[in-house]
Image (cartoon, grey):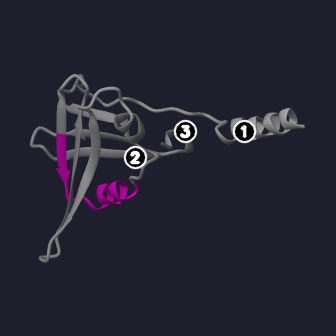
Amino acid sequence: MKKLIFVSLLAVTTAAVAGSNGGQQVSVWTDSYGQLNANGTFKSARNSADSQQYIGCSLYAYDTGSFSATCYAYSATGQYASCFTSDADMLKVVQTLNPASYLYFVVNSDGSCDRVISVNASYNLP
């Protein structure tokens, strides 16, 4: 009887972690247009073997009514990228970020964000 109960519990545990499980380490690179790019998943950055990499965005609101964001990424190899934006649509994307997020951003030559992309998916959950 004890063996049957153990087997049942094992089957339930296995089913609970089934499904696609992904993630991407933080990468920072310069593309063929000379723009700095960065991407990665929050999960992979947080759970990486190194203690260096991170990726994310910070939101800022001021009593003047202005609202902005800065996105940033640091890779395991020591490459850093950041950009800032006050663009309303990009701010909407930043507000969607959560622990299941993949973040991709591109930096213009003046340091502003060319684009900010977020993918929130079950395979990125921590």
Which residue, as the protein is rendered here, is positioned at the far front?
A: 2
In this rendering, which labeled residue sits more in front, label 2 or label 3? 3
Using the image, tell me which numbered label, if any, was put on residue 15. 1
Tell me: residue 117, above or below residue 38: below
In the rendered image, which quarter is residue 50 located in?
Answer: top left
**Earlier sequence position, callout 2 versus callout 1:** 1
Q: Nearer the viewer, residue 22 or 69?
A: 22
Q: Residue at x 54, y 39 (%)?
A: 123
Q: Amino acid at mark 3?
A: Tyr
Q: Residue at x 83, y 39 (%)?
A: 5
In this rendering, which labeled residue sits more in front, label 2 or label 1? 1
In this rendering, which labeled residue sits more in front, label 1 or label 3? 1
In the rendered image, which quarter is residue 54 located in?
Answer: top left
Left/right placement of residue 12 relative to residue 64 reads right
**Earlier sequence position, callout 2 versus callout 3:** 2
Q: Residue at x 20, y 61 (%)?
A: 68
Tell me: residue 35, above or below residue 119: above
Tell me the magenta residue range.
Answer: 82-96
Contact (CB < 8 A) between labels 1 and 3? Answer: no
Left/right placement of residue 17 relative to residue 112 reads right
Q: Whole-Å distance between the Cαs marked 2 and 1?
A: 28 Å
